[in-house]
Image (cartoon, helix red, strand yellow):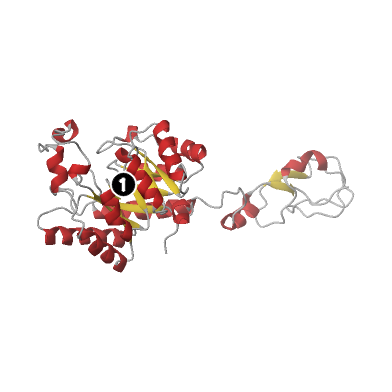
Amino acid sequence: MFSFDDLNNKNRTFIIAEGGSNWKCGTFDDDLNRAKQLITIAAECGADAIKFQVYRPETTYVQNAGTSNYLSEHGISENINEIFENLSMPYEMIPILAEYAEKQKIIFMATPFSIKDAQEIDPYVPIHKIASFEINHVRLLEFLAKTKKPILISTGASTYDEIDFAVNLVKKVHDRITLLQCTSKYPAPMESMNLSVIPQMKSRYCLPVGFSDHSMDPLIAPLVAVGFGATVIEKHFTSDRNLVGPDHRFALIPIELELMISSIRQADKSKGSGNKEVLKEENELQKFAKRSIQAIRKITKGEILREGYNFEVLRPGNMTRGLEPRFLAQISGKKAVKDVEIGEGILDYE
């Protein structure tokens, strides 16, 4: 059972496998089967959630919005209105996919781009997501806040003023908000990740902060983000990077998605308690190899203790461990209170 705490669990990163528009391939049945395939892949790779995008061109872009230079650079000549029309997920597909995801034991998510989109997906998702370019979509933010479900807000191409506004707007209703550091470039070069902003965002907003990753490497940015305190990782994936569509070429293939998830799970294990202490795994060598005050010759009761003459700071191995070396000044020149065999630790003095 999902709860907001799952988005802020430092011991287990919440991982969203982003299917984006990579379900689109042909007829309704073909699209549905590919979307189900993506759900199966995400579940088998160990993701916590699978996410799609739900939009309509008429409620996203103005008419005749034209062609993005970014898309043109990658051989996509259609204008953005045509692309969004082609990649619009039919509303009737949503409950089918949600039911299938439940059977696969993975959380179903979908990013809405309008209030109508949000109304359609709301009955089927436990978490809402605001895309980076929707962070200033006031009416959508208001609607999603009123559902009182946790909200993930991506912050790509945004300033603190814009993030402040979105956070404060949602906080009028509730504060179950998670921010996602994001670079709105597809693919995003590694030098544009700006992951060191994550601790700053956590401090500024006192909210969980994650990372929506558009880089192509499956490990570097996600693991660095986890190291900086991200508790949510979102990453695009596809069944085949050579398929036709705008999101396939920068998405992870299944083997990479599985590697990313397993690596994050191991990274989670490496975080520990946050307290600096001698761990149980260190106990044996801590006693065996850390230096202490040890006799270098037999010492008789009442003998004056002198460093370099009858004792030295050495690793004790299997001998009795003596006092910590920080007590050197206190023990030098004092008398042994009992006989100490060579190699044994010195524990008592007067």
In percent of width and height, residue 5 lies at 48, 55
Horizontal relation, residue 164 to residue 121: left or right = right
The quarter of the picture where the N terminus appears is bottom left
Q: Quadrant of residue 33?
A: bottom left
Q: How many labels does the image show?
A: 1
Residue to which mark 1 is pinned? 218
Task: Please tell me which residue is depicted at 31% across the width and 43% down the height of the picture.
Answer: 131
Is 78 drawn above or below residue 232 in the view shown?
A: above
Q: Can residue 196 be seen in this view?
A: no
Badge 1 crowding class, 10 Å Cα cut-off, few under 14, some 14 to 19, many 20 or more, is many
Is 293 drawn above or below residue 64 in the view shown?
A: below
Secondary-structure class at tag 1: loop
Q: Which of 169 and 27 lies nearest the eye of the viewer?
A: 169
In percent of width and height, residue 26 lies at 10, 55
Identify the amino acid type marked 1.
Answer: Pro
Task: Please tell me which residue is depicted at 15% across the width and 36% down the height of the picture.
Answer: 63
Q: Which of 79 and 347 lies nearest the eye of the viewer?
A: 79
